[in-house]
Amino acid sequence: MPPLEQHRRTVLPNGLTVVSEHIPATHSVAAGFWLARGSRDESLRENGISHLVEHLSFKGTATRSARDIALSMESIGGHLDAFTTKEETCFYARALDEHLPRAVDIISDIVCRPNFSQRDLDRERKVVLEEIKGLEDAPDELVHDHFDQVIFDGHPLSYPIIGTAANCRSFRRDDILAWRRRAFVPSNMVVAVAGNVNHGRLTALLSGLCPRLPAGRRGPPRRRPPRAGGGLKIVRRDISQVHLCLGFPSLPYTHPDRFALMLLSTMLGGGMSSRLFQAIREEAALAYSVNSFLEMYRDAGIFGVYLGTSPGRIQTASDMALAEIRKLSAAPVDGGELANAKAQLKGSMILGMESISNRMMRLARTELIGEPYHGLGHTVRRVDAVTAEDVFALARRLLSPERLSAALLGPVKRGGFELHRDILA
């Protein structure tokens, strides 16, 4: 088991929340500055601005050039990075525990004092446009964006995190500065640190953080997405394979049935022993890649299946995937399969907590979502408590034909694919 968790939480006078987990057996730390804003907080015209701001933050500050920022961490053997999601933006570093003050200083400089110069915007815009072109050449990733557009039907959760080329070209420096003023306030932020960290020293280090950031409250609650489902989107591309996502609106991150959902996903397509892998790859040899996936947000979720195969096999593979989904809502799983899924899920969770970065991310997301912090032992007990009847009841509730959506990308002729919902009936 991972070392004993020692969780601490402090809210500084300016509204910044600091959470830490002391893991004394390690010699490193992972520190993240998290912003409770992502692509779902953007308007359609703003789509992609969170991602662009993340990029621009590394281009220089009042005291450091872009090269200085990179060298400051790499010269001590550390690592500095960032990412944007639908609901969050994160700037984070990994370093030896003795270098935590420098890591915090560098990230706070990036977050609190970026230059956002016109010259940097003009240059980084080109980089993001190349990133967007790269996504166009990754159909197995791009099909998920199209699937989000179907299942969330115009809500901001349907917007691609990376944004669009047209928006990227249109953003002005004033747009970037206005977004930062609105989003980068201490009460929207969480600083999370895991590893060999002393919480008192950390809060003292952060007490003077970001003096130029205005105090303020978090913005209004995000809108609940519409209960979508029932759509099919076909994007025809001249590529070698067809890529398919199909699935259902699902549960938010804090829902009490989320552990039953995780087990449902594990049994359906969570590994080589899963139903989808065995049926579609091992027995029918219809696809190389097939898996289930979960996306859980603050107030919504997706439970889906991805597969990629040749154009002549996509209909058969889709129908077979739907047949496997149907079995889950037709009869309870047997005890042996459920026990195996629990062991697989718990093992994955525990192994994941061997990573200091994963522990830092778990700390931050728990805080951002508004859940009380619980140790890993509590989570394991929640998984163990799930029964076959719990999984069956959830499957019957979620996996109905009228809630099914799908997105397909590839060389499919008109009339060459149908979504056979009746298989689920």
Image: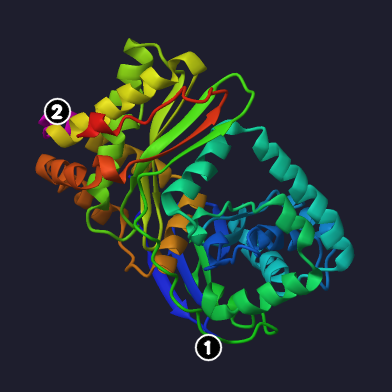
Distance Cα–Cα, label 2 vs label 1: 52 Å
- Residue name at image x 23 percent, y 58 percent: 256
Front disc: 2 or 1:
2
Report helix, strand or loop for mark 1: loop
Q: Position of residue 75 (x, y in %)?
A: 77, 51
Q: Quadrant of residue 136?
A: top right
Q: Which mark is residue 13?
A: 1
Specify whether residue 252 is in view: yes
Query: Dominant secondary structure of the magenta stretch?
Result: helix
Report helix, strand or loop for mark 2: helix
Crowding near the residue tagged with mark 1, few <14, some 14–19, many ≥20 C-alpha atoms within 10 Å: few
Q: Are marks 2 and 1 in contact (CB under 8 Å)?
A: no
Q: Residue furthest right?
A: 119
- Residue name at image x 56 percent, y 62 percent: 38
Region of the chain picked out in magenta, as a range: 331-340
16 versus 154 height, above or below: below
Q: Which mark is residue 66?
A: none
Residue carrying label 2: 336
Crowding near the residue tagged with mark 2, few <14, some 14–19, many ≥20 C-alpha atoms within 10 Å: few
Query: What kind of residue is marked 2?
Result: Gly
Q: From the viewer's side, name the closer residue of 340 and 26.
A: 340
